[in-house]
Image (tube, rainbow, N blue to C red):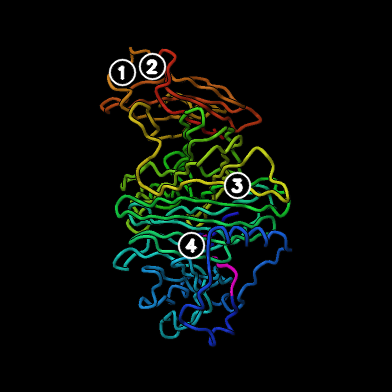
Amino acid sequence: MIGRREVVTALGLLGVLPQAAAAMRTVPGKAEPFSWDALQQRAATLATKPYSAPAKVAAAAAIDYDKVGSIRFRADKTLAGGIRLFPLGRYAPMPVAINVVEGGEARRIEFSRDLFEAEEGHAAALGIAGFRAMAPGGTSDWMAFQGASYFRTAGAQDQYGLSARGLAINTGLPGREEFPDFTEFWIERTGADAYTIYALMDGASVTGAYRIQSRHVAGAGVEQQVSSVLNVRRDIERLGIAPATSMFWYGEGNRAAAVDWRPEIHDSDGLALLTGAGERIWRPLNNPPHDTLDSFADQAPKGFGLIQRDRNFDHYQDDGAFYDRRPNLWIQPQGDWGKGAVMLYAFPTNSETVDNVVSFWTPAAPAKAGQRLQFDYSLSWKSTDPTAVAATAHVVDCWQGVAGRPGAEPVKGARKLVVDFIGDGLAGLDRQSGVTAKIDVVRGKVLANAAYPVVGQKNRWRVTADVAPDAQGPADVRLFLTRGGRALSETVLTPIF
């Protein structure tokens, strides 16, 4: 499903073979009419034909992760005001087709080795693996498309982290996941720091047409409006809409995994949900001992996404990867998506180079061969938390440790869960205010719990709970702060292993 970070961000797609490269032009090809409607029709027609998997360029296997960095797109060849291309490499062996759109016409960018420059003694470029959009000045980029249907942006702090993808198919079903490809792109510049990216998707079970309107605002982040039209080739057991892929190795909640000297290493620390009924839910991420799949049933969801709430540099101490600057990715469905579930799949990792977490929406109705499906949604890549509202306290820390009183013998067969909330709605409340923690546990029981304000901290409350999972564990804990029958906080959902 997910793997080495360089695989996730440096895979390639369908295109021309390198032996033909020398004869190809370095200027755009003949202008052809292009429209969003025509792309949808092309995808629909493609779905009626047998699937043919894109071929890899065998010579790309010799260009490893370090060597591919020695091949650079020439700045003077920059396209559409800020687009530069990625070369093929070991983790990007399949070329993509690139077109530039202007005035309703598209021109193909033909591959030529002189589009790139290579350091002396290193291999020349073999093809085009993807592209990126450069920020003004050309010293950094803010958006990149590369690998299957993966894409990502640098958010508000010029720092890449988690990725989105066009579609997830059978994620979490052992040995059955599919990775459809964006095989061709059409890039239209729509502003000084804005592009509309059109993409043709092809896969064994689906074809699709995508329109991704992207706008970068320096210091604020990136907003994208996505329209996806899918044509189902064959029945799909688990269709994943608006997938987000991230990495969680360890944080304050699983310190035993911290074999590295850095205190925490993760791109995101929680899954946030705003349900159709208006409930705010926070599911802390973890590095599970085995594959896990959580499902959060909903109807007409208002939003969901993978969030990096902890933005304190001291908690990471990483001045190279800058985990405190990693962007959030918040998905807002457009229109009524009906019944379904937000799913969270995770598997164990012992490295920061492995993306081991993915979230997505799965419709309740099965995807059947011959169907045409459409999903529109927005993607917000920012550092601010879209789920934090003043009136509702939100989680800022979540720990686990041995159960029992400090200094006493640990309670066998139990774990202590500690959750801290912060919010303006907690202002002025104290131990006599009647605030309690509402806690429910599936596959386990609560042995003891308490809720109280943290001494010396403004509008910060702590919930502690000793939880004993049963033999069918892990225990699933659901908790929130309440007073007089009214919820004061978002709802926390977390497993206890």
Identify the mark at residue 18; answer none if there is no mark: none
- On the image, the x and y values in percent for residue 340 come to 61, 36
* Gap in angstroms between the C-alphas marked 2 and 1: 8 Å
Q: Look at 40% across and 69% down and name the residue there.
A: 80
Residue that mark 1 sits on? 429
Q: Which residues are magenta?
A: 8-15
Residue that mark 2 sits on? 435
Would you say the residues marked 1 and 4 are in contact, meaning their CB atoms lie under 8 Å apart? Answer: no
In the image, is residue 185 above or below residue 26? above
Would you say the residues marked 2 and 1 are in contact, meaning their CB atoms lie under 8 Å apart? Answer: yes
Residue that mark 3 sits on? 240
Q: Nearer the viewer, mark 1 or mark 4?
A: 4
Identify the mark at residue 145; answer none if there is no mark: 4
Tell me which numbered mark, 3 or 1, is placed earlier along the sequence: 3
Identify which residue, 412 or 35, lies in the foreground: 35
Q: Nearer the viewer, mark 3 or mark 1?
A: 3
